Image: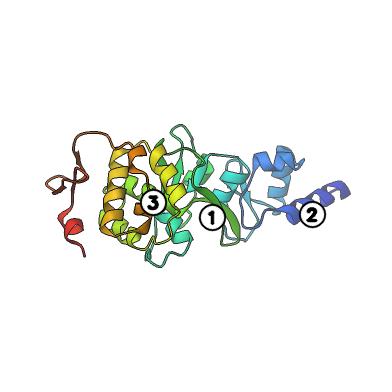
């Protein structure tokens, strides 16, 4: 290998984003062509994780490193949301055992690359495409396992949990999360509820916040939150709540 190529490989290894997969797009920006990447792969300097994605040899990569690559290298509109946002933040009221599902939220038309969806990250990946909320509202950068991730703030994450319920996430678990949300920011919560396109989610949040006696409720201007008309059946044969016009599971209605 020439001196120039030796310099390039050292530059690559020194600048490799910590804990991340590197993509062909990133390598190209680093001045490393596809042909040179193939030579590095043949020489054992890099290891293919999938088509267009590489890892450092003998170094494990976690799902966090893959998501960070999607966000930072490919600039995809994807963020860690719902239950996973609470898990990443180490929420004491949300503990999962075993193979926790990783919930990734994107816009309706966003596609995740095949190298990411085909790789075994050690956790099931649930890709949620939705237009329920504006793309950037309530999204923050958060350090996790050595990488910076775009994740939902608690105010957004709880609405995403409700969006997933009851099919992909249990309503009683949602409520148990709500009970612990004692520091929700009223201004952000107001913005999210006004911008939210799901009447079902908004009614569920207000019902749960009321049931849990969250202080944020007293600061919200409900007149500005569009709650639609008519009843909403959250579960069949549920208990009807007249104030919020929703039918909810009996175990949630009776939960103290």
Could you tell me which residue is drawn at 60 percent across and 57 percent down? 147
What distance separates the C-alpha of mark 2 from that of mark 1?
25 Å
User: Does label 1 or label 3 sit earlier along the sequence?
Assistant: 1
SS of the residue at dot 2?
helix
Label 3: how many Cα within 10 Å (few below 14, some 14–19, many 20+): few
Q: Quadrant of the C terminus?
A: bottom left
Q: Residue 64 carries which label?
A: 1
Q: Residue 10 carries which label?
A: 2
Answer whether residue 81 is visible to the viewer in this image.
no
User: Does label 2 or label 3 sit earlier along the sequence?
Assistant: 2
Classify residue 240 as left or right of residue 170: left
The nearer-to-camera label among 1 and 3 is: 3
Q: Quadrant of residue 51?
A: top right
Residue nearer the viewer, 22 or 173? 173
Q: Dot 3 corresponds to which residue?
A: 219
Residue nearer the viewer, 53 or 236? 236
Label 2: how many Cα within 10 Å (few below 14, some 14–19, many 20+): few
């Amino acid at each position: 290998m020439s001196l120039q190529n030796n310099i390039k490989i050292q530059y690559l290894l020194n600048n490799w984003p910590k804990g991340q997969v590197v993509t062909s797009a990133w390598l190209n920006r680093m001045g490393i062509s596809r042909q040179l990447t193939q030579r590095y792969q043949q020489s054992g300097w890099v290891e293919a994780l999938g088509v267009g994605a590489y890892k450092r040899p003998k170094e494990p990569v976690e799902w966090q490193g893959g998501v960070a690559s999607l966000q930072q290298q490919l600039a995809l509109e994807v963020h860690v949301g719902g239950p996973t946002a609470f898990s990443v933040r180490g929420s004491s009221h949300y503990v999962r055992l075993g193979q926790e599902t990783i919930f990734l939220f994107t816009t309706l038309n966003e596609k995740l690359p095949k190298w990411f969806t085909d790789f075994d990250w050690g956790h099931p990946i649930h890709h949620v495409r939705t237009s329920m909320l504006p793309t950037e509202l309530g999204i923050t950068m958060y350090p996790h396992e050595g990488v910076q991730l775009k994740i939902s703030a608690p105010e957004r994450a709880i609405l995403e949990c409700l969006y997933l319920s009851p099919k992909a996430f249990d309503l009683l678990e949602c409520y148990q999360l709500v009970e612990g949300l004692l520091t929700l920011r009223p201004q952000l919560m107001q913005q999210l509820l006004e911008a939210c396109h799901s009447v079902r989610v908004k009614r569920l949040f207000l019902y749960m916040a009321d049931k849990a006696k969250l202080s944020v409720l007293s600061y919200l201007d409900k007149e500005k939150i569009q709650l639609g008309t008519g009843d909403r059946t959250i579960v069949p044969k549920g208990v009807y709540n007249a104030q919020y016009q929703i039918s909810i599971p009996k175990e949630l209605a009776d939960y103290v």
